Image (tube, grey):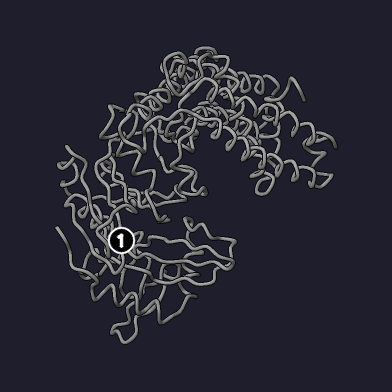
Amino acid sequence: MSLAGQSPWTDQVRSALEAQGRGPIIEYLQRQRWFRGKGRSVADARFLDGFELSSGTVPHVLAVLLVEYRGGGQERYAAPLSVRPRAEGDDAVAIAALSDSTPQLWVCDATRDDEVWRALYAAVGGEKEIVGHVDCLAGKVIPGQQEELTAPADCVKVLSAEQSNTSVVLDRRVIMKLIRKLDLGINPDGEVLEFLATQTSCRDIPPLLGLMKYHDCRTEETAVEGTILVVQGFVQNKGDGWTHTLMRLEELLNTSQSRREMSDTFLGEIRHLGRVTGRLHLALASNAELEAFRPEPTTDQDVEGWQGKMTQFLADVCRDLRGMPVEQQALVGLSLDEPDRLEKVCRTRFENLRLLAEGRAAKVRCHGDYHLGQVLKTDDGFVVIDFEGEPTRPLEERRAKYCPLKDVAGMLRSFNYAAHAVLKRGRPMSATDRDVIMEWERAARAVFLEGYRSVAKPDEAEFLPDTWEDVVRVLQVYELDKALYELQYELHNRPDWLSIPLQGIRSLTLEEV
């Protein structure tokens, strides 16, 4: 089903924004958590395209805003907008006034307007096509899910925790994620979820119900097709893995029960998470037909490319460490020659990536940004969410094939951060309490890997080296690389947390530093 092209309301929104110039759009974007350009100098911002979602008493338009930066580069963002009278308290959402309207109408952010989300939900369920000036939006229902997407949507709740995108729950039955930053190309979140839902038997993700895709409507080609909306079944959960882990660690410290009994139960959950991770990687490596997901042998050129990026980043981080103020170096116990020693040892460790090519381990699609915040705790275990990859990375990197031990390393580093986050909460902490937390981290690492290994066996999984000893050597490389990224982030954003990744790097290189 197709809807008409550029509508009068879309034209009016465009005219109102163009009449005000770039200022109101820039101010609006700077207020949004999902805008990635904070701190960059914006040269221009304008309305690029729009899609009318409803034309009732309050018209709604899904706008695409184009941002151009001084020094080069541009980004596109999706923004649901409404046209309505300005109300008290609208300062944060009002963007621009429509000229010659009586009463005075304003273009406003419509993220909190329930009707926007109902209209998007209906467009996906009805597989509607909405034509804009440049692009077309097209709803798509996953086979077998039509009934789930035709039920009425009464209760709409916009989630506030997310930063990169916007997620909305309908009747605690459906969750929709609006992709805010629209990259020119295939979004890995929708791509991976659709692959897992239609090409595998993986059940460790929320069920995919439908998608809204976009492509240039001026051509028949859909090769540059992207995803703007992901619709999944809502999974009843107890929060993400990060929140759940911090809560369980606090319980472990405060319990009057047997710590051993509680710890064993908690570690059983972590072991299960290891199995979930192994099953996910096997599913992602299970199709030899689709080019985007077909496992490929790791080559010497692959290894050299990965090592080159790691080595360059290592040099940048060590340079930053050398440039730290003396007082800050003293706080984390950084000696004058430690950056040089760390750089030397890490370069040597990076050579272990060659085990992937020597053993002809396959490179496959991975999660790409795997940590405790990317899983939901359910009554039955865990489900994995958010396959978009690291949002700041280029699209081609987020869709590239790697060794899945990179995901495993991300989760192990997340355990380390969870342990230290509890220790840094400011409450009085006895030496015994500290020992309990650090012992939990050591045990969590061990049982997670045990669970993973029970599913993804080195002598069977084509994406792993042939022996567990080689798996551990490669895993250490990815843990080091992840800890270096954490180190740079904390150095520039949270200096008080700098000791966590630095201590992680020291532990990983303990024998030689």
Quadrant in the picture for the C terminus: top right
Tag 1: residue type?
A: Asp
Which residue was labeled with disc 1?
Answer: 216
Q: Is residue 245 left or right of residue 152?
A: right
Q: Residue at x 55, y 15 (%)?
A: 259
Furthest toward the front, the residue is 300
Displayed quadrant of residue 444: top right
Q: Is residue 145 left or right of residue 463?
A: left
Q: Could you say where residue 367 lies in the image, as x and y percent from the top left?
A: 44, 35
Quadrant in the picture for the N terminus: bottom left
Q: Could you say where residue 408 lies in the image, as x and y percent from the top left?
A: 51, 27
Q: Residue at x 29, y 52 (%)?
A: 213
Furthest toward the bottom, the residue is 100
- State whether residue 98 is above or below residue 343: below
Q: Could you say where residue 161 lies in the image, as x and y percent from the top left?
A: 45, 47
- State whether residue 246 is above or below residue 99: above
Q: Residue at x 37, y 49 (%)?
A: 186
Q: Could you say where residue 144 lies in the image, as x and y percent from the top left?
A: 16, 37
User: Does the image show residue 228?
Assistant: no
- State whether residue 352 is above or below residue 417: above
Q: Secondary structure at mark 1?
A: strand
The number of callouts visible is: 1
Displayed quadrant of residue 457: top left
